[in-house]
Image: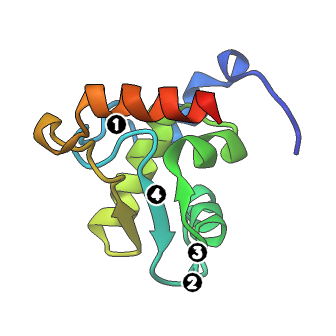
Amino acid sequence: MTSRRVDRENPDRLYTVTGGRSRADESAMDMVTLIVSECDPAPGMQSEHFKILRMCRQPMAVVEISSELGLPVSVVRILLCDLLDTGRITARHPPAALPKAQLPDPEILKQVLVGLQKL
């Protein structure tokens, strides 16, 4: 993998890659959302979309895709929203944290810890 600095990226290229858009739907995905391809890349597709579809044959986090493409997460989110809108990918959100009512009692956890330390 070739390493290159994002801050040296040509802003004109990023503008072209995103079609001039600067924001993606924030609620659609975050940095740890897993992306999975639902189809194979098609001829004539934008090269970044093509690469994303090939990379995501197995679930891959948004931040990993960003790293592999060498593009800012914000740009990758815009590209992913394009693919999501056309049904070419699926976004799998990580499970939410358990509500406080479902967490074990801290006192029980302390007792377990003390018991383990005595072993």
Q: Name the front one of labels 1 and 4.
A: 4
In which quadrant of the rendered view does residue 40 lie? bottom right
- Mark 4 vs 3: CB contact within 8 A: no
Q: Which residue extends farthest top? A: 7
Residue 110 image position (x, y, % from top left): 39, 25
Residue pointed to by mark 3: 44
Residue pointed to by mark 2: 40
- CA separation in Å, label 2 and label 4: 17 Å
Residue closer to the observer: 92 or 65: 92
- Mark 2 vs 4: CB contact within 8 A: no
Eyeballing the image, is 57 above or below 65?
below
Instruction: Provide the secondary structure element on which disc 2 rests.
Output: loop
Residue 109 image position (x, y, % from top left): 37, 32
Residue closer to the observer: 51 or 107: 107
Instruction: Inspect the image, locate mark 2, and give the three-letter code of the amino acid beneath it.
Output: Asp
* 119 displayed left or right of 80: right
Instruction: Inspect the image, locate mark 1, and give the three-letter code of the amino acid beneath it.
Output: Arg
Residue closer to the observer: 83 or 44: 83
Q: Name the front one of labels 2 and 4.
A: 4
Q: Mark on residue 34?
A: 4
